[in-house]
Image: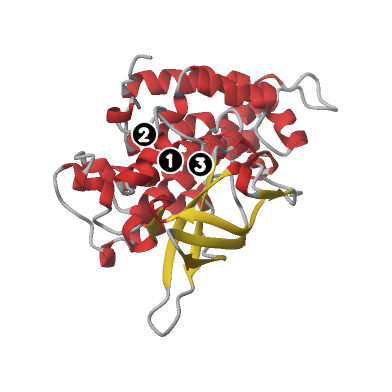
Amino acid sequence: MATWTHDDAIEWAESMVEPLVARAQQAEQLRQVPQETIDECNAVDAFALVSPKSVGGHGLGLQSLTHVTRILGHGCVSSSWTIGFLMLHNWFIARSPQPLQDAVFGDSTHALVPCPLAPTGTAVPVDGGYSVTGRWKWATGVMHGDWVMVNTMVKRDGEGPPESRFCMLPMDQIEIDDIWHTSGMRGTGSNDAVAENVFVPEHNTVPAVDLRGDNPPGAAIHRDPWTGYAFTPVLCLLASSPALGGAEAAVDHYRDLARDRVLPYSLGDKQAEQQGSQIRLSEARSTVRAARLVWQDAIDTVCDTYDAGGIIERVDRAPLRLATAQVVRLSPSRDHCY
């Protein structure tokens, strides 16, 4: 399958908006992304968006990932969130040691790997690996996963500092606890993943300090700057993208409704002609525009720095997290419009 450019990825995302709108209610009812949407993503290898080109992926980076996710948010925020993180988690694999990459990618361009980040499991060292037990909440995409990448605390004999280690579990080795009964983001299917004494080979694990650190093992394998981008800013910027896309769509929806709506108890007056409606629309449009500018500036800061061979020191990353929080706060809901 042909490798995408950034423009190809954007064109595909835009083509998905209408189908996602049509299935948004179904996603709410199913409490997960409809399988038809997953199939359409697989048909064009969309989940390989950020997979390395060396494994047949598209090899795109943060700009493409965040903009694709934002655009998908115009159709269904839950589906955008789920698809975006299933794309991103192939970047996690690319940052890992070669044996783990070989196990997960195999002869495929990508894997669907939900990855709950909280270290709410334990890994007990045994011969050849670890015995993993735990429950991990908010496992977005777990209803469609090939593997689950879980964070554990390693329990070793004797003293020493605790170690957080990510472990790869095949889906048939975990139980999905269907607890995702929510009032918002219902379509993400972010159920609990549960494991009890599951053996995980040593080569299917990676210390959290390596995965999340500034010199991940994969950076020596895939020598593109994207592999070594700062971990937490990337996660935060992606997480803000569906909210921004949903906000842009909400403002457009209000504009379209107001254009055609005739006010009750009037002589045919249009809502769009009312000063109050125009003020509310202008405020919402300027707010979402401000959110997008903050969002894009943070993305550009990360990309420009790392692509030029630099690094953003940890002490300087707080403004990036602040920016993403501000984007979500500014992203107006329908309540801002009506």
- Residue type pointed to by label 3: Val
Residue placed under numbered mark 1 in the picture: 88
Q: Can you name the residue that lies furthest to the bottom here? A: 159
Residue placed under numbered mark 3 in the picture: 113
- Residue type pointed to by label 1: Leu
Q: Residue at x 49, y 44 (%)?
A: 287
Which residue occupies the foreground of this view, 280 or 266? 280
Q: Give the label, 1 or 3, closer to the camera.
A: 3
**Quarter-of-image position of residue 57:** top left
Q: What x and y, as percent, mark residue 249?
A: 57, 31
Residue placed under numbered mark 2 in the picture: 50
Marks 2 & 3, CB-CB < 8 Å contact: no
Which residue occupies the foreground of this view, 211 or 169? 169
Q: Residue at x 68, y 37 (%)?
A: 32
N-term mark: 2 or 3: 2
Marks 2 & 1, CB-CB < 8 Å contact: yes
Disc 2 versus disc 3: distance between alpha carbons?
A: 13 Å
> Is 243 on the left-hand or right-hand side of 214?
right
- Residue type pointed to by label 2: Val
Q: What x and y, as percent, mark residue 27?
A: 70, 32
Disc 2 versus disc 1: distance between alpha carbons?
A: 7 Å
Q: Height in image: 9 above or below 210?
A: above
Which residue occupies the foreground of this view, 104 or 294? 104
Q: Could you classify mark 1 by the number of other residues whose Cα lies within 10 Å: few (under 14), some (14-19), or many (20 or more)?
A: many
Q: Residue at x 48, y 29 (%)?
A: 71
